[in-house]
Amino acid sequence: MHSIMQIANGIGILNAEKMKQRGIDSIEKLASSSVEDLIKIDGIGAYSAKSYVELAKKHLKSMRTRERIKNIIKKNKSPAVSITGTKACDLMLFGTNRHKVSLDSIKKLASSNEEDISRLKGIEISNAKRYIDIAKNYLSSMRPKEEGEDLVEIEPREQMKEIKISNDSKLKKVSISPKLKIKDYPQKLAVKTQTLKRGGTYQKMQDIDVKSTKRASYGIDIKTGRKKNPKSSPSILKTFFPFTTMQKIRFLHYKIKNLEESLWKNKEFSFTELNYVLNYIKILNVNYKTQSQIKILKELDISNTFYDPIDKKEIKIWDLIFECSRALWVSAQAHSILSKKYEAENLMENAIVAMVECSKMYKTAAYFSAACTRQEDRGFTLSVENLELSSEESRVFAQALATTSEENKRNYSMASKLSAGLSALTKRLAFVKRNDKIKENQYKAQYQYDIGRACHLKAKSLFILSPEEIDEERIEKIQKKANYYYYKAEDLWENMLQETTLNPVEKDCIKNNLSIVNDYIIENDAELIGDSEALEIQDPEPLIIVPENLAPFIPRTTSYLNIYKQTDLNFDAYLRYKNLMADVLVNFNKIEELNNNKAGVGRTIKQLKILYENNEIDINSFTELFEKYSIKLEIIENAIRNIRTPENKKVQNKLKSPLIESTAR
C-alpha cells in the first residue's frame, strides 16, 4: 500500500487529511473508490472526485511501470532474440552515448577500464561504470542456467579467420563443428534454440517489454533510463482557474441563475442576494488575452446560453466578458423590481437608492457588452445602445422618485427644483436618435409636463410664505407659465392618441396622463399665454440629485484599461462631486431656514411698530427691542447673501483641485 500523502500536492493536503479520516488512507483505496463515496466528503464536488480517482489510477500505473523496469534490470533479463539468426547487443541500454561505444565486443567492454572508456568524448566516469556493469550483467545472463538447454555455438572472429573458404561461385554448406566452445563472444550474440515451454515465457516477456515502453511515457524512459520532461506529460488538473476558484464560480453562477428564475416567476428575493453578482464579476473580470474562452467555459461547466426576451431567441455565449454583461443585466432587473417594491411600501429613500443602483448596473453591463471581443451575436437586450438607454431611463426614474418624495413632504420649493432637473434629464432622452417614434414623442410630452409641474410647485411654495411676502403678480405669472407647458404636453398626447400603431395598454397610459394634466390646468386657473410672453417668465432652477452614472467595474479586456494606473481608478472625482452635491443640498436647506427666521423677525418688528403707534409700549422698550431685532434681521440677510455669493469663494476655488481631472496620459 502506498500512502495517500504521496499525491497530496495533486489533491490538496486538506482533502488528503479528510480522506484519511474516512478510511481512504492509500492510493490504492482512492483509485478503487467511487465518485459517490468521495462527494460525501465535505468540500469535494463530483468533478473534483472524478479527477482525484483518475489521478490515483495514473499514479499507480506509473509506479507499476517503474517496478517492472527495476525487476527487468535486477533479474538481468536479456532482450528478445531471434531463433533463426544472431542479434547484436542492444546498445540502447547505454543511453544517449551508445553511438560512441566503439569496442569490438561486449566482452571487451566488460573487461575494459573506466578510465579507458571515459577518454571517449562526452562519456563521464559514472556513465562508463554503468556501461561496464550492464555489459557484465549481460554476459552473465547468457550463461546456461537450466540443464537440457540447447545452444548453437559460434566460433569467435579470430577462429573464423582461420577457416578458408573456396572462391567457387557456388558455396557449399559448412557444417559447424561440435567441438567449438563458447570462449570468446562475438559482437553478435549466440542464439538459443528455445523449447516450446521456453517460447511461451519469451513471448510473455516480449509483451511486457512493449507495455513497459508505452507506459514509460508517464514516468521513466526505458531507453535512456531517465525521467521524461514533466511538461510533456498530460495533466488533468491544468486549467485556467484554480480548482477552488472554479468551484466558487459554479456556486455563484448557480445563485445568479436562481435569482434570474425568481425574477421571471415573481418570487421574493433579498437585497443581499445581489452581492453574488458583484463577487461573480470580480472573479471573471480578467484579461484573457489569447486564451480560448470556449475551452475555459467548458472547464467551468456553466450554462453558456442566454434567452433574449426582446428578440425572443436563445443566444450562445462565446465570451466570458459577455457572460459578465448578462449577470449585470440580471442585477439591474432585480434592483428595478426592488425599487418598485420599496415605493409600494412608501420607503422612498430605499426606492431611490435601488433605482440609482439599477442605473449603475445597466451602465456597467453596457461597458462589458462593448468590451466583448469574441461574441458575434449580442442580441438586442444586451446591445450597447439598449443598455445605455436603460441606464438613462433608470436615472430619470430615480429623479422622479426623489421629486415625488419631496412633494409628499410638502417641501414644494425643493420639489420644484427636482422637477425642473427631471425635465432636463427627460429632454436628453427625447432628442436621442431612436427609431421608435412613439417613444420619442412620449419623452417630448413628458419633459414639457415636468417643467410645467416645476412651475406649478414653485407657485405653491410661494403661497406658503407669510402674507407680507406673498407676491401675487409673480405667482400669477408662474401659474401662466405652468399652464403654457401643460397645454403643450396635452397637445402632444392628443396627437399620439390618433396613432393607429398604439396598443390598448399604451392608449390607457396616455388617457391617464391627459386626465392628470387637465386637473392641473383647472387647478391653476390661469389664462393661456403665447411663446413671446412665456420666454419673459423665468423657469425654476433645475436640481439633479442623481449623480452621473459611474460603473463599479471596468472590463479589463482592452490593453489601455490594463495599463491604466490603479491610482486613477479611485473615483476621486466622484467623491468630490458627491461632497459638492451634499454641500449644495445643505445650502438650500440653510437658505430656507434663514428665510423662515427672517420672516419671523420681520413680523416681530411690524408688531412692535403697531404697539408703539397704539401707545401700548414705552419709547425706551420700543427702541431697545427695535434695535435688537433690526440687528438680528441684518445678520440673517448677510448670512443669506454669503451663502448665495460668498466673498471668498473665488479664492477657494483657485486653490482647490478641479472637479473632474483629465485622465489623458
Image (cartoon, rainbow, N blue to C red):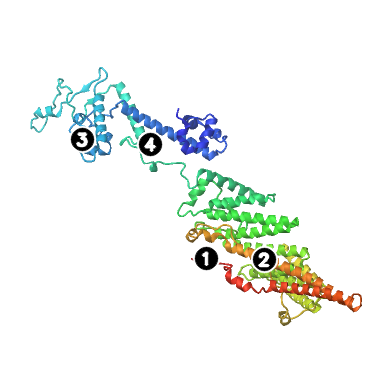
| Residue drawn at 53 percent across, 43 percent down | 244
Q: Amino acid at mark 2?
A: Asp
Q: Position of residue 592 (x, y in %)?
A: 75, 69
Amino acid type, residue under disc 3 in the picture: Ile
The disc, 4 or 3, on the residue closer to the chain's N-terminal end is: 3
| Residue type pointed to by label 4 | Gly
Per the rendering, the mark at residue 219 is 4
In front of the other: label 3 or label 2? 2
Specify the quadrant of the image occupied by residue 343: bottom right
Q: Residue at x 67, y 73 (%)?
A: 646
Give the mark nearer the N terminus: 1 vs 2. 2
Residue at mark 1 to residue at mark 4: CA–CA distance: 55 Å
CA separation in Å, label 1 and label 2: 26 Å
Q: Earlier in the sequence, mark 2 or mark 4?
A: 4
Foreground disc of the pair 4, 3: 3
Q: Amino acid at mark 1?
A: Thr
- Name the foreground residue: 18 vs 68: 18
- Nearer the observer: mark 3 or 1; the answer is 1
Judge left or right: residue 396 versus residue 19: right
Residue under label 2, please give it. Answer: 583
Q: Which mark is residue 117?
A: 3
Residue denoted by label 1: 663
- Which one is earlier in the sequence, the residue at label 3 or at label 1? 3
The answer to whether the residue labelled 2 contacts the one labelled 4, judged by CB atoms less than 8 Å apart, is no
Circle 3 crowding by C-alpha within 10 Å: few under 14, some 14–19, many from 20 = many
**Residue 607 vertical placement versus 85 (above, below):** below
Is 286 drawn above or below residue 125 in the view shown? below
**Crowding at label 2, few (<14), some or many (≥20) Cα neighbours within 10 Å?**
few
